[in-house]
Amino acid sequence: MTAQRITKTTSQSLLVILAAACCGAALTPAQAQGPQAVKAKTQYQVSNLPGLGGTSSGGNSINNQTWVAGYSRLAGDQTRHAALWRSGLLSDLGTLGGPNSSVTWNVKNTEGVIVGISQTADPEPLGEFWSSSAFYGAPFNIGFINLGFVWEQNQMRGLPNFPGGNNGFATGANNLRQAVGWAENDIHDPTCVSPQVLQFRPAMWTLGPPDQIQDLPLISGDTSGAATAINDNGQIVGISGICDQAIGRHTAKHAVLWENGGVTDLGNLGAEWWNTPTAINQRGDIVGFAGDPAFVEGDIVHAFMWTKEDGIRQLKPLPRRTPPHVDSEAYGINEARQVVGISCDADFVDCRAVVWNHGNTPTDLNDFKGSYGPRLESAKDINDNGEITGRAIDTAGVRTAYLAEPH
């Protein structure tokens, strides 16, 4: 429902973007080792990832095994399926019986678990659009119940909602068999904006079988929220606010961190909307995007990085662009504090994949893509090897999932 304010380039027309008591866990020896050092001016070998026959695909997650997960449209461009690329080979993850599914956030799990969202074959009884509708595209983006899913051992299964709720959404999973996201309950919340009806809460699932759901505490006075990412220390990030449209905005009044059973407000950049953490690394560094008080309800947002040492601070868009870039959104971070995301002009016509090294001045990934032709439009995730995935666009407007490998 609420979370990721689907990237401006994908969802501005919809005005969207796009877990429980935290369990502490020590880092494994492999995690405790420092990541590879990556130079600020790294060159990349960029390659397209194969699709399922349609004209749009995107990589949204990349783990340290170079598993890329995201989505790909099917032939005819009316539906899309969650997709997984391993060694360049594409797996269609299928659906829970409905037309569409997708992996929309950076999952990060390295134990063979993928999570995301999928439509079922069941009609949506209250006419809600739900959070996931913005991630699918017409004509079948609404009208069906959606569930968070977990995929492992070549099988997809739906995750449970809170009692009385119809819809759910899964975003991330760690290596402790914990997944996070959000799910509806049975409360008809007056802060919901039509067609949303039911309240929803941030959720953590302990993966089974059986899969078990528990909610996470909200900031005092808030009614709805969503969890967006989790690390192997049981630290979870997400949003807390009101029900609103179930696609962020005022549901993201507060950017929050859950740990040790409590919830902490991470602060903002001056506005009480679209304050959305998108990723957390193992050391607890957090990135995301936050509203701008100069823009009512947040047409323009700014990337941020939060650390225990410095709190929240803005990550700037690309400088010296014509027209000027004013919007920035951060989506992924690795252990070396390399942050990836997107930088756009005010009309979201010129959007570019960017890298912030240690939160410093952004670098246009397109300046280091070698002979690769299409424009790298977004960078959605980065692993500890410095490998990046996202979406590229060619001169014909075809959008394709890519893998950028440093060399």
Image (cartoon, rainbow, N blue to C red):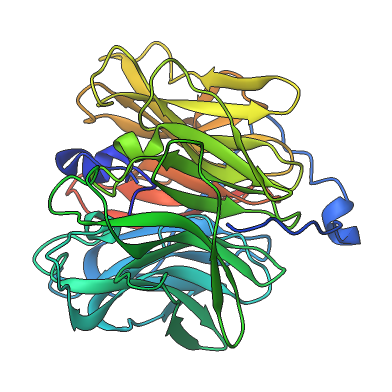
Return the x and y of residue 170 as percentages of the image width and height. 45, 64
Query: Would residue 12 be found to the left or right of residue 116 on screen?
Result: left
Q: In which quarter of the image is residue 173?
A: bottom right
Q: What residue is shown at x 14% (from left), y 67% (from top)?
A: 126
Q: Quadrant of residue 31?
A: bottom right
Query: Which part of the image, by quadrant, shows the N terminus?
Result: bottom left
283 above or below 63?
A: above
Q: Quadrant of residue 198?
A: bottom left
Return the x and y of residue 367 as percentages of the image width and height. 48, 30
Query: Would residue 7 be found to the left or right of residue 27 on screen?
Result: left
Return the x and y of residue 391 as percentages of the image width and height. 37, 50
From this viewpoint, which residue is outermost toward the right? 29
Q: Is residue 88 among what the camera can see?
A: no
Q: Is residue 297 among what the camera can see?
A: yes
Query: Would residue 273 be found to the left or right of residue 389 on screen?
Result: left
106 above or below 165?
A: above
How many marks the image carries: the answer is: 0
Q: Decide which of 226, 313 is in the foreground and name it.
A: 226
Q: What residue is shown at x 37% (from left), y 66% (from top)?
A: 168
Q: Decide which of 244, 38 is in the foreground and name it.
A: 244
Return the x and y of residue 302 as percentages of the image width and height. 42, 24
332 above or below 325?
A: below
